[in-house]
Image: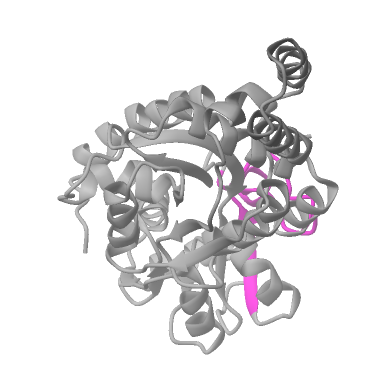
Amino acid sequence: MLRSAILAAKRLKRVVVMKLPRRQFLHLAAGAAALPAVSRIARAQSYPSRPITIIVPYAAGGPTDTVGRVMAERMRDLLGQPVVVENVTGAAGSIGTGRAARAAPDGYTLSLGDVSTHVVNGAVRSLQYDVLNDFEPVCLLAISPLLIVGRKTMPATNLQELIAWLKANPDRASQGVAGASSQLAGFYFQTTTATRFQVVPYRGAAPAVQDMVAGHIDLMFPPASVALASIRGGDIKAFAVAAKSRLKAAPGIPTVDEAGLPGFHTSIWQAFWAPKGTSKDLVGTLNAAVVEALAAPPVRQRFTELGLELPPREQQTPEGLGAHQKAEIEKWWPIIKAANIKAE
């Protein structure tokens, strides 16, 4: 649909160059205006006319990077231009997110972030940008419940045994943290279970999982997208999924409610933002491409395989993402500040 609209807009532009009689031109223009999204794209003239960059603020191979690459491949076909993923890591995602905030608001730079970069970091870090007011929401992409996993040599075989072992060995275990959301999940786990363990920061979830496979760290609270391959391969243990329902991609992993820690529900989500000042026309064109990409069966199948859930259609609008982000800030910021959580 979007691709057809772009082609129609380009045909309309060629008609203008040919200097057709006014009546014939108006007739053609009226017909073209009836096509989906053509008026918006015509106003944006030839956009996009060059590659679009998606800035991923984490290491390649992590959950946010994976989502970005799946979306980039589909959006390239819909927009007719290369969509390039650029990994800009460091400071729990704030370096890459800051670069996106400072980019020109011309529709050629997208910030791919999550609850850490666009919610939690605003409460735990001193930033050179505002996570809410320096971006234009484009679209909420995916929601992923967190898993509770451990190294395969961990003596515990289920969640209750894990909690008992942690209580018997305070400050002995180490948690790999990749982003503020996993740090927050670890803090809540300790508070809820009266356990204590150390925190080891990483630039991305994938390197942390690699260290867990090697036995260098004991615990993680990662999204399914980054941990399922290692779980299926028997390289790490999965104790529970922090959600009300089991994952379609891994139905053998019990929920926290089933495993003896009821109500410990926490997830991360990914979304696209554009720099502040990006026009509504450009945001609308980008949103249309993203929504159509999310509806594509190959994208939906890949997301399911990764343990990702698609947001409801009403949340796949710029306004829906804006409301979701504000609600998350109102929920988490008071809790983070009351707990005095600071960036490591």
**From which residue to which does the magenta span run?**
236-261
Tell me: 87 left or right of 94: right
Residue 205, compared with residue 217, is above or below; it is: above
Q: Residue furthest right?
A: 297
Residue 45: give x, y in percent of width and height. 54, 35
Magenta region, main secondary structure = loop
How many callouts does the rendering have? Answer: 0
**209 relative position to 246: left or right:** left
Q: In the rendered view of the protein, which quadrant contains the N terminus?
A: top right
Foreground pick, 320 / 257? 320
- 167 up-or-down from 144: above or below: below
- The picture places residue 194, in percent across and down from the top left corner, at 36, 53
Q: Is residue 37 visible?
A: no
**Image point 62% across, 62% down: which residue?**
69
Asked if the magenta segment contains residue 225, the reply would be no
Residue 196, above or below 115: below
Figure quadrant of the C terminus: bottom left
Name the foreground residue: 83 vs 320. 83
Verify whether residue 259 appears in magenta.
yes
